[in-house]
Image (tube, grey):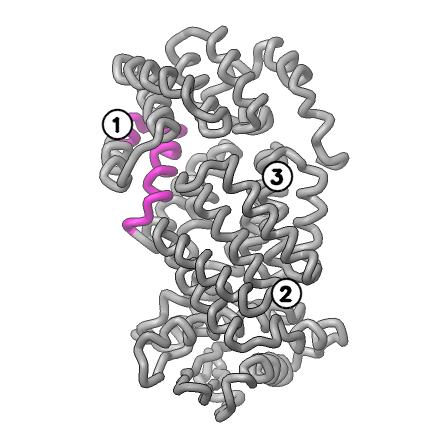
């Protein structure tokens, strides 16, 4: 599904065209017989500068759905056509001239027509899923689309605006489950980017995800959000259950596979994590975030050459993608390319608008591993002083333990690792996978520390 072109009289209705694109992708992804590419990968084709065949090769797909949307007041015109990528022939085309209130019926009809054109038999359960209206209030739905439009921009201001639009949608329809799911997603990203304290963000995200599932237990998005929160809070058994529900609800949901991979990595289940990563890449093949994460995963798997390929792919997709630059530092360190790692670290400084003490601690860890001891000591002092005034969940214990270990003080490294396990900011399994912790994880005290934290009791039975 390529981005729908906005041909509305008002350019501000761009949010509606983008939102309809995302919603059609979501509707079609509920059909098990189809492999539907995620929004992240298709939005790069919004300008329409490439031919269908070229796009299809890049996305590794056989057919492409494209079209346009025109919204004028309460009137809606949507034009869509399904194209065979090899011959560029139209398999099916349709114009919909309807009222805005018919938007859900249009989404259902398009999904059914695509399935029929591709000879995909719809199960009764799938028919119910794609025919289900998320809300009976079209006004609330358009507000939700605005929320998703701003959520996809992924900066602090846009995420805060997305929450406002989701809340406004809920005021219009208090039983609108997708809007609650949007709020949960917004707080998760705000936490990931360090814009909201975890102590506040977890509570709000969890409440919103739980409310969404109370209203609609079939939402893959809400199950995924809740699973991510539970995993971060070391409630791994329940997280595993929620990821399972998400993937059963929509196996085409790339974010569920991506976040489940992170969950598996945190439990040390590297082979399974790689399997989920590869599925996420199939569904979202042009996502710089997924490739940037993949680079770290392969570092932990100690497949450093593959990690370098992954990070280079991420930066090929988006040369200015900050998380990829951050992660490339660790790929270089793993390959003992210390000069390159330090140069990349200097580069990442320019990508940060501000630097939290947690991020500063990471810089110190980079310096320590690369042999810049004086700089590492200076940052260590800064961060230890700051940690006395911070919430435990906001301290980067893992990085401080790394600095102490590289300074030759294993006892202090153990102390900071233990603090991290108690605060649940890092898991013993990831520590075990980290090449720079080999000296400490091979020490008998490490196994004693793991027993002391009681972490083994929290691991799912098959983990």
**Of pointers 1 and 2, the one earlier in the residue sequence:** 2
Is residue 445 magenta-colored?
A: no
The tag on residue 231 is 3
Labels 1, 2: front one:
2
The image position of residue 163, as x and y in percent, is 46, 56
Q: Is residue 453 left or right of residue 154?
A: right
The image position of residue 280, as x and y in percent, is 54, 54
Rendered-image quadrant of the C terminus: top right
Q: Is residue 263 left or right of residue 68?
A: right
The answer to whether any part of residue 342 appears in the image is: yes
Q: CA distance from mark 2 to mark 3?
A: 27 Å
Q: CA distance from mark 3 to mark 1?
A: 36 Å
Disc 3 crowd rating (10 Å Cα; few below 14, some 14-19, many 20+) is many
Quadrant in the picture for residue 453: top right
Question: Does residue 136 sit above or below 258 in this rendering?
Answer: below
Residue found at the far front of this picture: 171
- What residue range appears in magenta? 319-342
Mark 3 in CB contact with mark 1 (< 8 angstroms): no
Question: Does residue 434 sit above or below 107 in this rendering?
Answer: above
* Secondary element at tag 1: helix
**What residue do we see at 74% from left, 75% from top?**
123
The tag on residue 339 is 1
**Of pointers 3 and 1, the one earlier in the residue sequence:** 3
């Amino acid at each position: 599904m390529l981005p729908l072109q906005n041909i509305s009289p008002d350019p501000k209705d761009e949010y509606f065209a983008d939102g309809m694109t995302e919603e059609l992708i979501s509707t079609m992804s509920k059909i098990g017989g189809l492999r539907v590419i995620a929004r992240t990968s298709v939005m790069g084709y919004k300008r329409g500068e490439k031919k269908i065949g070229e796009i299809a090769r890049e996305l590794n797909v056989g057919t492409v759905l494209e079209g346009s949307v025109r919204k004028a007041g309460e009137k809606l015109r949507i034009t869509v056509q399904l194209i065979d990528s090899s011959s560029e022939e139209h398999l099916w085309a349709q114009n919909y001239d309807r009222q805005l209130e018919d938007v859900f019926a249009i989404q259902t009809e398009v999904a059914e027509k695509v399935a029929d054109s591709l000879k995909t038999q719809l199960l009764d359960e799938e028919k119910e899923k794609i025919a289900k209206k998320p809300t009976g209030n079209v006004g609330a739905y358009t507000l939700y689309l605005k929320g998703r439009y701003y959520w996809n921009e992924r900066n602090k201001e846009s995420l805060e605006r997305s929450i406002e639009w989701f809340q406004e949608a809920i005021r219009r329809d208090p039983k609108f489950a997708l809007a609650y799911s949007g709020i949960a997603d917004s707080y998760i990203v705000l936490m990931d980017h360090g814009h909201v304290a975890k102590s506040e963000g977890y509570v709000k995200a969890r409440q919103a995800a739980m409310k969404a599932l109370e209203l609609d237990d079939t939402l893959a998005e809400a199950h995924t959000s809740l699973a991510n929160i539970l995993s971060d809070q070391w409630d791994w058994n329940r997280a595993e259950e929620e990821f399972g529900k998400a993937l059963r609800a929509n196996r085409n949901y790339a974010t569920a596979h991506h976040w489940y991979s992170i969950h598996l990595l945190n439990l040390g289940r590297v082979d399974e994590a790689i399997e989920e990563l590869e599925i996420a890449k199939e569904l979202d093949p042009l996502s710089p975030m997924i490739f940037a994460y993949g680079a770290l995963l392969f570092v932990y798997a100690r497949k450093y050459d593959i990690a370098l390929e992954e990070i280079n792919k991420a930066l090929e997709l988006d040369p200015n993608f900050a998380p990829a630059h951050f992660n490339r530092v660790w790929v270089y360190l793993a390959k003992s390319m210390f000069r390159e790692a330090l140069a990349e670290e200097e580069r990442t400084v320019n990508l940060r608008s501000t630097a939290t003490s947690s991020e500063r601690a990471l810089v110190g860890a980079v310096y320590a591993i690369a042999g810049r001891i004086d700089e590492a000591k200076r940052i260590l002092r800064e961060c230890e002083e700051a940690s006395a005034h911070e919430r435990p969940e906001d301290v980067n214990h893992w990085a401080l333990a790394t600095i102490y270990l590289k300074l030759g003080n294993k006892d202090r490294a153990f102390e900071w690792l233990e603090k991290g396990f108690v605060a649940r900011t890092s898991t013993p399994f990831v520590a075990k996978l980290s090449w720079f912790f080999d000296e400490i994880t091979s020490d008998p005290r490490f196994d004693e520390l793991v027993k002391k934290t009681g972490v083994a009791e929290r691991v799912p039975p098959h983990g």
